[in-house]
Structure formats: C-alpha cells, structure tokens
Amino acid sequence: LQLQWQLPPQNGMYRTKPANTLGHLIGHEGSGSLLSFLRSEGLATDLSAGVSEEGYGSNSICSVFDICVTLSTRGLALWKEVVVHVMEYLDMLRRLGSIPDWVYDEIRQVSNMQYRFIEERDPSTTADDLSSSMLP
C-alpha cells in the first residue's frame, strides 16, 4: 500500500530536514509506533516513510512524501482500515504540536552511526550522495 502527498520543495530545508523528521517518526519500528500497532493487528509486516532523494521524489517544484506499507494477507483484505490507522497516526502527530528533543537526538545518533559504519561502495556514489545532502 503506497500513500503519497505532494509537499513544497524540501531543497531549501537541508539544515532542518522536516520531511526526514516526519519520515523518522512515521517509520519508527519501536513500541508504540504505527508499525508496531499494525503488526499487532496482523495488518502489516513492514513500513517505510519519507521523501525519496532520487528520481521525481524531490526537485525544485515539489517533493513527494511516501508512506509504503507492506500488507499482510489480512491487511490486504482490510487495506481501508490500514489507511484509517495511518491517517489517525498523522493526526496524532499533528496534535502533538512540537516534537520532543529526544526525537532529534535519536535522529542525530542514527545519522552519525550510518555515516560511521557506511558500507563500502563506489566512491563516486558516496560523493554524489554527500554532495546532494548539502544542496540548498
């Protein structure tokens, strides 16, 4: 199940990365997360969220925010219920207002670990990824 929203371009927000923060919150897999709930209901097995850095996902005109849910057999039959749960989760985040500091700390720690333990790959790909994250 793929849900998409068109957002304003995120290119100028490279310092704060609000779409990344939202993707982190929605895609979280821990206790109390959307995925944890969907799994407990037997509706989904995986979930990812965010703006793709490649292709049409992010450009100077708009950004496309995706929520992709891998549905279970039960979830496939009840996909509309899954959409309702996703929308309820988004509404809960909206009502939350400000995001707690621990979320930003967690994102920073995860990003630092991903950078420190990056898998070896073609140097030009690494340079391309690093330079695109610095674009205004």
Image (spheres, grey):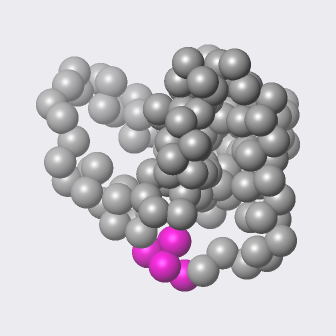
Q: Residue at x 53, y 63 (%)?
A: 32
- Total labels: the figure holds 0
77 horizontally vs 100: left or right: right
135 vs 93, left or right, is left
Residue 35 in sight = no
The residue lying at 45 percent from left, 39 percent from top is 131
User: Start and end of the magenta stretch?
Assistant: 101-105
The residue lying toward the viewer, choosing from 92 and 112, is: 92
Please say if 1 is above or below 114: above
Q: Where does the N terminus fall, quadrant-wise?
A: top right
Taking depth in this image into account, of 41 and 85 the one nearest to the observer is 41
Q: Position of residue 121 (x, y in %)?
A: 20, 25
Is 68 within the magenta?
A: no
Q: Which image quarter: residue 75?
A: top right
Residue 120 percent across, percent down from the top left: 15, 31
Of the pair 117 and 60, the residue shown nearer to us = 117
Establish if 50 lies above or below 21. above
User: Does residue 40 appear in this view?
Assistant: yes
Q: Is residue 96 above or below residue 120?
A: below
Q: Residue at x 79, y 76 (%)?
A: 97
Rendered view: 2 above or below 130: above
Does the magenta stretch mainly form a helix, a strand or a loop?
A: helix
Residue drawn at point x = 84 percent, y = 34 percent:
6
Question: Is residue 102 rendered to the left or right of residue 20?
Answer: left
